[in-house]
Amino acid sequence: MTARAGLQRVVAGVAAGALVLGAAGCATESDATAGDYRARIAVITEWDGGSFWAVVKQGAQRAADDLGVELKYNTADGDHERQAQLIASAVTDKVDGIAVSAADPDAIQDAVEQARAAGIPVVTLNSGAEKSGALGAVAHVGQTETVAGTRAGDRLARAGGKKLLCVNGEGGNIGQVQRCQGAQQGFGGQSETINVKGVADIATTLSEIESKLRADPRIDSVLTLNPDIAVAAREAITSAGVTAKLATFDLSADVLTAIEQGDIEFAVDQQPYLQGYLPIVFLGLFRTNANLVGGGDPVLTGPAFVDRSNAATVRKLVEQGTR
């Protein structure tokens, strides 16, 4: 048995045991009996595409399989009003719990309040940690984006950077904004944020980054917030003919290759597999055993750094779809 498989069995065993025991004591609420846990949990994210969200989805599905949960996974494709509609639909469907990313807390607030009024617990994931409590969520799973950005910016500054370009491919996402703000604070020197098309139009994104680098040769440090955009930024640096250190948030096989080759300095890993897996566990434990996790603070899944010292180890897990 691998270490990862062993850990999953331990987590699954503890959680499943608590779910079964809790179900026996809460049968009038959930119609569940010992050994027959029939929860339906909706996971509603703002995005589905790209390597990051694929790992979130795999984590959620694995948790559902481990715990015998019926998973209803939906994505809003970047439309936060659509995300609110999907939450409202889940409430109408009378699911037992909702896990939702909170990139735009204001857009989903009314829908989350509908869930609370219906007695459906909500866990927020990924972005929106600072607004999770105000939304009424029972827990948040993710990383504190400002802190993660600060540490990334500081690391680039210590590598000798004098002017930082933070590349935001999802301008309306509060978590992305906080990453760039944190990076600027940690960097300490000159810094600038550019909003680009993002993963929906990588070719245009590459062109936008290249144009910015050509226009301002003082930029010697580039931080992207997405692994697919990181690959585009690497090509943009080459095409622009400039020398700039590149770092990114989140992982992919291409990013790991670039790290091993020295083209990317490091990646900030927030462990998206846990952001899919843990909300399912937490919602199940809250429903059947009245457990609250985090004590009002986020359950942090990052930041961690992947560089040339550990890229080979992490690569194996990326290939399995769990990092």
Image: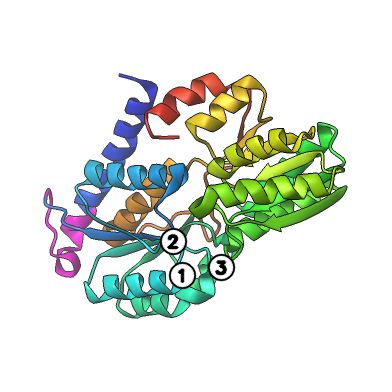
- The quadrant the C terminus occupies is top left
Amino acid at pointer 1 = His
* Residue 184, x across and y down, in percent: 78, 52
Question: What separation in Å lies between label 1 and label 2 (alpha carbons)?
Answer: 7 Å
Going by the numbered disc 2, the residue's amino acid type is Glu
Amino acid of disc 3: Lys
Residue 217 is situated, as x and y percent measured from the top left of the image, at 85, 42
Question: Pointer 3: what residue?
Answer: 131
Q: Is residue 10 above or below residue 121?
A: above
Please tell me which of labels 1 and 3 falls first in the chain: 1
What secondary structure is found at the residue carrying circle 2?
Answer: loop
Q: Which residue appears at 79% of the width and 32% of the height? A: 243
Magenta-drawn stretch contains 34:
yes
Task: Check if mark 1's residue and mark 2's residue have beta carbons within 8 Å.
Answer: yes
Q: Is residue 312 above or below residue 269?
A: above
Using the numbered discs, state the Cα–Cα distance from disc 1 to disc 3 in whole angstroms: 15 Å
Secondary structure type for disc 3? helix
Residue 280: percent from the left, percent from the top?
33, 52
| Camera-side residue of 58 and 11 | 58
- Would residue 19 appear left or right of 259 to someone viewing this image? left
Residue located at (56% from left, 47% from top): 203
Dot 1 and dot 3 residues touching (CB under 8 Å): no
- Magenta segment boundaries in residue numbering: 22-35
- Quarter that holds the N terminus: top left
Find the distance from the CA under tag 2 to the CA under tag 3. 16 Å
Q: Residue 46: which numbered mark, if any?
A: 2
